[in-house]
């Protein structure tokens, strides 16, 4: 039996985590031969609820779950951690502006970045789910100067999966027949879901799609899917967000499929003219636990305009959190 991988999860008593922990413990993220040790973080008032979640985890008798530890101290929850999934933060309320969210949640990620810096395994892989995810990941990375900034990422996989779902529905195909979807930029309504490189059965999908549907239906539907779900469900996406977080980390650790790529927000290296350091979503391939930006894609004027708009929003968010860096 392999040694357990230490997986730290914050906001462990929340909605997304309730859909996440059990799948990780069942082997959906790291494989059916990889034991996991869960290190769960919550704020003090939620510790009792977390104890209930732990009872349920134990009651599942998962063969791969080697241990579960809980704490309200990030230093304890991140100790020797190999993987950190930063979910815990406030979801946006009905009357909240994005700027309020950045102010409230940004502070959480400076504390957690420091705690990761001081306690985590040097090879830790971090995914930020809590919103505003890209800028929170940026803050965490900046507060962890002893860790490689490339180890910090933010989740765009839900947006990527939503784009695949919308496009396959339109084409009356199964989404597994599509490859090379890209979502560029920020996890927000400025993100740019880009079908320019999508392949179906060996040919480019863009030839089969009319521009009117692309501009007036596909792009805004994907951009605003989170809000549509909140309206319908009365609560923000949870199971789909958990599933996307598992997809993100599984592919990062175990590799992306041949002839395909995924969307991940990572520190920009300046590729495609995006400002270096911004936590921006790019098309990436993963191999041996490392990701690489897909290079050499043609960028049309239509795409460039949208890639710049979402870059601009990220620059504004970064300016708003300069005191946390
Ligand atoms: P919940 O309110 O159900 O759970 C959040 C949990 O985080 C709570 O249990 C809370 O006690 C805990 N928490 C708060 N501050 C903490 C801290 N400093 N340390 C540890 N735990 C802390 O929200 P949930 O529905 O689980 O959503 C969590 C976050 O994911 C929100 O910010 C939400 O906006 C974001 N989302 C991100 C998505 C993405 O694609 N990146 C999509 C889904 C979701 O909207």
Image (cartoon, rainbow, N blue to C red):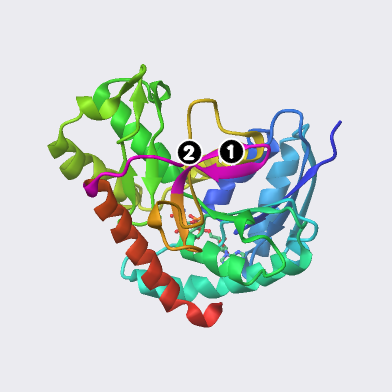
Q: Is residue 72 visible?
A: no
Task: Residue 279 in the image: state x and y as whole percent.
Answer: 48, 59
In-image side of 139 versus 33 (left or right): left
In-image side of 244 versus 231 (left or right): right
Task: Residue 286 in the image: state x and y as whole percent.
Answer: 59, 38
In 3D space, how far apart are the residues under numbered discs 1 and 2 (Cα atoms)? 9 Å
Bounds of the magenta segment: 282-301
- Identify the mark at residue 262; answer none if there is no mark: 2
Residue placed most toward the observer, 103 or 287 = 287
Q: State the image quarter where residue 84 is shown.
A: bottom right
Task: Residue 106 in the image: state x and y as whole percent.
Answer: 51, 72
Residue 208 in magenta?
A: no
SS for callout 2: strand
Q: Residue at x 34, y 33 (%)?
A: 197
Residue 300 in magenta?
A: yes
In this rendering, is residue 297 above or below 117? above
Residue placed most toward the observer, 238 or 61 = 238
Q: Are marks 1 and 2 in contact (CB under 8 Å)?
A: yes
Q: Residue at x 38, y 35 (%)?
A: 181
- Residue, disc 1: 286
In-image side of 69 versus 172 (left or right): right
Q: Residues within 10 Å of mark 2 (few under 14, many from 20)?
A: many
Q: Residue at x 21, y 25 (%)?
A: 208
For the N terminus, the image quarter is top right
In-image side of 7 versus 141 (left or right): right
N-terminal-most mark, 1 or 2: 2
For the C terminus, the image quarter is bottom right
């Amino acid at each position: 039996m392999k040694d357990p991988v230490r997986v730290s999860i914050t906001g462990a008593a929340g909605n997304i985590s309730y859909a996440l922990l059990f799948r990780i413990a069942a082997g959906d993220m790291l494989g059916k031969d990889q034991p996991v040790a869960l290190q769960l973080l919550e704020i003090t008032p939620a510790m009792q609820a977390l104890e209930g979640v732990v009872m349920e985890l134990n009651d599942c008798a998962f063969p791969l779950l080697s241990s579960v530890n809980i704490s309200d101290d990030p230093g304890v929850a991140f100790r020797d951690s190999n993987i950190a999934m930063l979910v815990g933060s406030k979801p946006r309320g009905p009357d909240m502006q994005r700027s309020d969210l950045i102010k409230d949640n940004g502070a959480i990620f400076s504390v957690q970045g420091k705690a990761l810096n001081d306690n985590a395994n040097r090879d830790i892989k971090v995914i930020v789910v809590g919103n505003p995810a890209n800028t929170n990941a940026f803050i965490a990375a900046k507060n962890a100067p002893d860790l490689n900034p490339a180890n910090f990422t933010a989740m765009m996989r839900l947006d990527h999966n939503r784009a695949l779902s919308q496009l396959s529905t339109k084409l009356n195909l199964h989404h597994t027949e599509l490859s090379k979807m890209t979502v560029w930029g920020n996890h927000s309504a400025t993100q740019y879901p880009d079908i320019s490189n999508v392949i179906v059965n060996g040919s480019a999908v863009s030839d089969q799609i009319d521009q009117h549907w692309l501009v007036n239906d596909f792009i805004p539907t994907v951009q605003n899917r989170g809000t549509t779900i909140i309206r319908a469900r009365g609560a923000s996406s949870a199971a789909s967000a958990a599933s996307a977080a598992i997809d993100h980390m599984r592919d990062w650790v175990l590799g992306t499929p041949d002839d395909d790529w995924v969307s991940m927000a990572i520190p920009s290296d300046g590729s495609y003219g995006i400002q270096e350091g911004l936590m921006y979503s790019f098309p990436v391939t993963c191999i041996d636990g490392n990701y690489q930006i897909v290079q050499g894609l043609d960028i049309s004027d239509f795409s460039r305009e949208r890639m710049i708009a979402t870059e601009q929003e990220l620059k504004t968010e970064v300016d708003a959190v300069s005191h946390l860096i």
